[in-house]
Image (cartoon, rainbow, N blue to C red):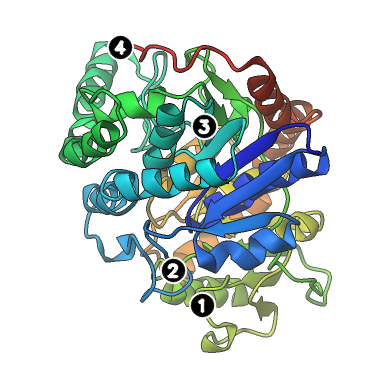
Amino acid sequence: MPENNFLFATWAGGGAVPPVLSVARALHERGHGVRVLADVSLHGEITAAGLEPVAWSTAPQGDPSDPAKDVIRDFEARTPLGALARLRDNIVCGPAADYARDTLAELRAHPADVVVCEHMLLGAATAGEAAGVPVASLATTVYPLPTPGAPPPGPGFAPAEGTAGRLRDRLVTAMSGRPWAKGLPALNAARTQNGLAPLGTVVEAFERVDRVLVLSPRAFDHEGRRFPDHIRHTGPRLEDPSWAKEFDLPEGDGPLVLVGMSSSFMKQRDLLQRIADALGALPVRALLTTGPAVDPASLRAPANVRVVASAPHSAVLRHAAVTITHAGHGTTVKSLAAGVPMVCIPLGRDQMEVAAHVRFAGAGVTVGKGSTAARIARAVRRVLDDPSYRDAARRMAVAIAAETATDRAVTELESLATARPAHHPAPSK
């Protein structure tokens, strides 16, 4: 018999999937029972991790590698607020009742000691609260909600300086909850349908869990940022997804550049072509990974650039001198863990914030997604030629190694299953 039973709930959220499954697999390997509620498109990856998948029956089903099947379709949004509205309406709040219904049905069929949900699945968290089961959420990037001692996350602000900076932070923090307001009726409907009191804001719902485990290096966030006790940094997950295949390094002696620009569709094909063209003009060799959303055959590859659908980034990074990335959290922390500096080209979502933290750490530079091949080439040359970027990345590698020396996420979840604390802290003010 398993020591404890954990029900995981996740969705086809691109780079958020591998770290969630990494935690689930670690629990399974320690002898716990683990089931994973997820979109059918993820079931192959779940099975490859040795875990038992369970399909959503009424909640949305998506596949981010196929734009026709993507649930959010944030690549169609014209502004960051438009992209956030799609996430709110299509995952976080709009289908909250459906996620809650499916999660409760699974809990009735297979009782669990803890519900572990990806941070955006407030419907699954609602189900755990209604069932009286401890709930942990997994934040798979820099903690995405405002807390004291740091600028509001999202735009990539540097820490405030002086009166003007503090005023900026107060105003942006006050405004940051407004886009969520339209999702509150749907979220509260899910709560009242399951015997729970309505909330005053959506942000309160993110805080009504027993633990938030931040799967990101604490050293990567602002040093002065303060967190409530139920928010715990447990370090990044550095495993590669099961679909990342073996690789052959490009031939030659030049510095190796790894390129990875999102595992989900974000209209990145043209940018990938500009990156390939930029690298073709430099004395480097490059491994360009397109991910599932872009056909490698659709790119024209210069002689010094090898284009493949996938490769295990952690293994490639042992040989790399620089990474060109969209600043997805997964590729970013793997690069830092390997001591490899970056050229960041954010495409959307949390990527402006992650890229900003790379700059704050001194471990890379950022250029816009509309940059020409010549500008991208200059950025790569700058990072290769200035050793300060490599030195900063290596300092971050030391910090990440210390944070990942033990599996804090597993320890926290085992503790939650054993202690079964009084459910849900009061929302922080």
* Residue found at x 19% / y 29%: 175
Q: How far apart are the alpha carbons under marks 2 and 4?
A: 40 Å
Which amino acid, by three-letter code, is at mark 1? Val
* Residue found at x 68% / y 39%: 393
| Mark carried by residue 162 | 4
Badge 3 is on which residue?
360
| Mark carried by residue 294 | 1
Q: Quadrant of the C terminus?
A: top left
SS class, disc 3: helix
State which tag comes first along the sequence, 2 or 1.
Answer: 2
State which tag comes first along the sequence, 4 or 1.
Answer: 4
* Residue found at x 66% / y 24%: 417
**199 or 330: nearer the viewer:** 199
Which amino acid, by three-letter code, is at mark 2? Phe
**Cβ–Cβ below 8 Å for labels 2 and 1?**
yes
Estimate how packed mark 3 is, as few (under 14), some (14 to 19) or many (20 or more) residues with alpha carbons within 10 Å.
Answer: some
Q: How far apart are the alpha carbons under marks 4 and 1?
A: 45 Å
**396 or 123: nearer the viewer:** 123
